[in-house]
Amino acid sequence: MTKKELLPATIMAVLIVYCLKDIGGDFVGVGIPKLIGVAVVFIVHKLKHNMLLSVFSGTAVYMLILYLMKIM
């Protein structure tokens, strides 16, 4: 595996660890939206193999869930 092939996977791993590092405190309010966002990133990346689309779609879903939780 070359550096060009390894870098996207490494970036995704760092983003996932950074995203999930503070789930412990409020799992329902913070953890569930983050886990759903990570799942969307994983699914979109497996379907489309486009890292930029995966990150943007996961972020959009996460922000939408937070917005919907706030107005309810």
Image (cartoon, rainbow, N blue to C red):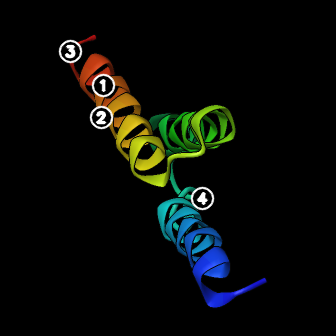
**Label 3: which residue?**
71
The residue located at (56%, 65%) in the rendering is 12
With 25 as the anchor, is 10 left or right in this view?
right
The answer to whether mark 1 and mark 4 are in CB contact below 8 A is: no
Which quadrant of the structure image shows residue 40? top right
Real-space Cα separation, disc 3 to disc 4, in angstroms: 24 Å
Residue 61 coordinates in the image, percent (x, y): 39, 29
Which numbered disc flags the more N-terminal residue, 4 or 2?
4
Cα distance in 3D space between marks 1 and 2: 4 Å
Q: Which mark sits nearer the N-terminus, 1 or 3? A: 1
Give coordinates of residue 34: x percent, y percent: 51, 44
Q: Nearer the viewer, mark 3 or mark 2?
A: 2
Say whether marks 1 and 3 touch (CB < 8 Å): no
Amino acid under disc 1: Leu
C-beta proximity under 8 Å, tags 1 and 2: yes
Is label 4 in contact with label 2 (beta carbons under 8 Å)? no
- The residue that mark 2 highlights is 63
Query: Callout 2 environment at 10 Å: few (<14), some (14 to 19), or many (20+)?
Result: some
| Image depth: mark 1 or mark 4 in front | 1
Mark 3 vs mark 2: which is more N-terminal? 2
Residue 48 location, x and y as percent? 58, 35
Q: Secondary structure at mark 2?
A: helix
The numbered mark, 1 or 4, whose residue comes first in the sequence reads 4
Element on which disc 3 rests? helix
Give the residue number, with chain letter if any, for mark 1.
Answer: 64
Q: Quadrant of the C terminus?
A: top left
Q: Tag 4: residue type?
A: Gly
Relative height, residue 32 to residue 19 (above, below): above
For disc 4, the marked residue is 24
